[in-house]
């Protein structure tokens, strides 16, 4: 066993050997001083109790999910049912915004490996004309709300070790897109080691371990550990709007959603959309042993996936958009007591080194990564609320390089939305059968986000043609 002077670190090294992780130090003798320091700094980040927990899950001696699950559809405030109620709850949400009780929370710590973009996904350009990055789109939506409700919405952004510095630097370079620097808070989520099939921590090279961010569910702990929850408490924030970095249509801090959430006295609310078909790869919200929760598409049995009601509708239709409203007091109670969400394991293809320390890339799934999911928090709440929204208006994710959920589909969905706003306000515009115009133009979130906004600015709108940009 190697020995170091720092007694805490030495203890950790002993624990690692005791957990059969001595291989981490097998190249120690050939490492230079800097490399040794780097390895030790990585070792210091390993949380031994968590490591033991992951190892038990990894070898199957403990189950990820235990027990018998009885699934049933849950109650959803559907678009049909919302018709007569929206106007009654909207003022509740608007009032909370005016009173400064609301904050936005973006989780952007993921690796975005499917998109294959070199950098944080929020930097990826998405809009048709100005090629605005996702972060700018969100910032402008917040600025719009700040103006409309005469408020200053704080924005909490979770990053991870893999993208934190680039994210913060980008915001600085872009002068926070016009937001006040004091209202944008960045913090990092924790990382977890990944394991090979024999339960050994995977090494990226001779002196680095392979760590991955601990999933969007890591936000529960990170909000607490970073002091963000205390900051919210101090600012009088009561409602936290949670969203993910890839949805170009997200209606940030939607006052209507907020109104429903407040009216329902919900601790955690969720927006859902109708799945396009049984096989769409989307988690569904349903009752799990009587409690609202999300079942990932891969965990939904074949019978449930294809089940239909008597009128032919999908039984489990409520697709999770990963858009939530959360009660800050509930978060303080849960996270403040050190609660964290369960780990899920996934087999992945992870770059590693061989016995000689040479880097290898296997084509097979050679390792196991662990992650936590924010929707598991639903299983802890006493009161939740689920609301259906229109996919075409509120959900279009950038996940893949091409095909569905890609930059191309997101651009099409943005164009369809811009065109919808104009045509509904009676502005002449040619569109095809899918509502898509024959050219690309763009409406800034600062210019208009609703038909009413367009109506109010009709005289400023020029003839729309290729490259038109409606901005402030
Ligand atoms: P995804 O599930 O799409 O994962 O994240 P990903 O890592 O970004 O992308 P792939 O799977 O490698 O292609 C959904 C949202 O959760 C955030 C992401 O940044 C995104 O907003 N997330 C994911 C985190 O903040 N931390 C994580 O550890 C994982």
Image (tube, grey):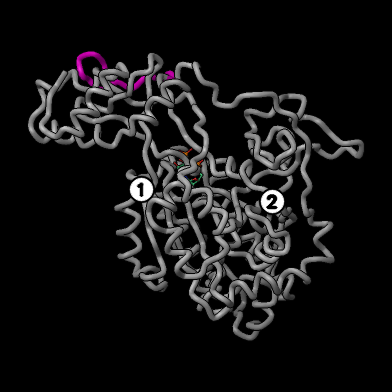
Residue drawn at (38%, 68%) of the image: 176
Instruction: Please identify, in this view, whether the residue under mark 2 or under mark 1 is nearer the observer.
Output: 2
What's the distance in space between the residues labelled 2 and 1, CA to CA? 38 Å
Residue drawn at (28%, 18%) of the image: 18
Position of residue 153 relative to residue 62, above or below, is: below
Which numbered marker is on residue 404? none
Tell me which corner region of the image, top left, top right, bottom left or bottom right, holds residue 424.
bottom right
Residue drawn at (75%, 29%) of the image: 70
Residue 130 in magenta? no
Residue drawn at (33%, 43%) of the image: 162
Position of residue 350 relative to residue 318, above or below, is: above
The image position of residue 316, as x and y in percent, is 76, 37
The image position of residue 79, as x and y in percent, is 79, 56
Q: Which residue is mark 1?
A: 119
User: 293 left or right of 74?
Assistant: left
Residue extending furthest toward the right: 310
Q: Helix, strand or loop at disc 2?
A: loop
The image position of residue 430, as x and y in percent, is 70, 66
User: 245 left or right of 205?
Assistant: right
Quadrant position of the N terminus in the picture: top left
Comparing 155 with 442, the one in front is 155
Which numbered marker is on residue 383? 2
The numbered mark, 2 or 1, whose residue comes first in the sequence reads 1
- Residue extent of the magenta highlight: 354-365
Comparing 57 with 279, the one in front is 57
Comparing 354 with 19, the one in front is 19
Q: Determine if residue 350 is in view.
A: yes
Name the main secondary structure of what is drawn in magenta.
loop
The image position of residue 322, as x and y in percent, is 59, 48
């Amino acid at each position: 066993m190697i020995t170091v002077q720092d007694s805490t670190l030495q203890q950790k090294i002993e624990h690692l050997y005791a957990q059969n992780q001595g291989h981490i130090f097998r190249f120690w003798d050939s490492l230079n001083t800097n490399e040794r320091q780097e390895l030790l700094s990585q070792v210091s980040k390993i949380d031994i109790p968590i490591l033991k927990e992951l190892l038990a899950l990894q070898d199957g001696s403990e189950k990820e999910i235990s027990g018998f699950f009885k699934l049933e559809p849950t109650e959803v405030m559907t678009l049909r049912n919302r018709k007569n109620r929206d106007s009654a709850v909207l003022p509740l949400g608007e009032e909370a915004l005016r009173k400064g009780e609301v904050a936005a929370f973006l989780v952007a710590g993921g690796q975005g490996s499917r998109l294959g973009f070199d950098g944080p996904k929020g930097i990826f350009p998405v809009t048709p004309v100005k090629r605005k990055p996702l972060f700018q789109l969100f910032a402008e939506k917040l600025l719009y709300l700040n103006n409309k409700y005469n408020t200053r919405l704080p924005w909490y952004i979770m990053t991870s070790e893999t993208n934190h510095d680039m994210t913060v630097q980008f915001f600085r370079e872009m002068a926070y897109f016009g937001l006040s620097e004091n209202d944008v808070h960045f913090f990092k989520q924790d990382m977890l080691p990944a394991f090979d099939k024999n339960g050994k921590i995977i090494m990226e090279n001779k002196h680095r371990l392979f760590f991955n961010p601990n999933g969007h569910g890591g936000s529960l702990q990170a909000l607490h550990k970073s002091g963000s929850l205390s900051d919210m408490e101090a600012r009088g924030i009561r409602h936290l709007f949670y969203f993910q970095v890839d949805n170009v249509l997200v209606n940030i801090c939607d006052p209507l959603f907020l109104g429903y959430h407040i009216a329902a006295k919900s601790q955690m609310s969720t927006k859902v959309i109708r799945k396009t078909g049984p096989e769409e790869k989307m988690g569904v919200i349903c009752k799990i042993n009587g409690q609202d929760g999300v079942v990932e598409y891969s965990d939904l049995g074949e019978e449930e996936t294809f089940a239909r009601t008597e009128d032919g509708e999908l039984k489990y239709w409520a697709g999770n958009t990963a858009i939530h409203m959360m009660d800050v007091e509930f978060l303080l109670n849960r996270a403040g007591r050190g609660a964290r969400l369960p780990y899920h394991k996934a087999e992945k293809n992870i770059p590693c080194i061989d016995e000689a320390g040479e880097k290898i890339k296997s084509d097979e799934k050679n390792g196991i990564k662990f992650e936590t999911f924010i929707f598991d928090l639903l299983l802890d709440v006493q009161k939740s609320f689920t609301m259906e929204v229109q996919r075409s208006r509120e959900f279009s994710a950038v996940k893949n390089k091409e095909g569905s959920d890609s930059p191309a589909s997101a651009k099409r969905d943005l164009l369809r939305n811009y065109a919808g706003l104009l045509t509904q306000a009676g502005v002449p515009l040619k569109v095809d059968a899918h509502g898509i115009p024959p050219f690309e133009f763009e409406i800034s979130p600062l210019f208009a986000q609703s038909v009413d906004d367009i109506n109010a600015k009709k005289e400023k709108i020029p003839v729309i043609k290729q490259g038109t940009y409606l901005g402030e």
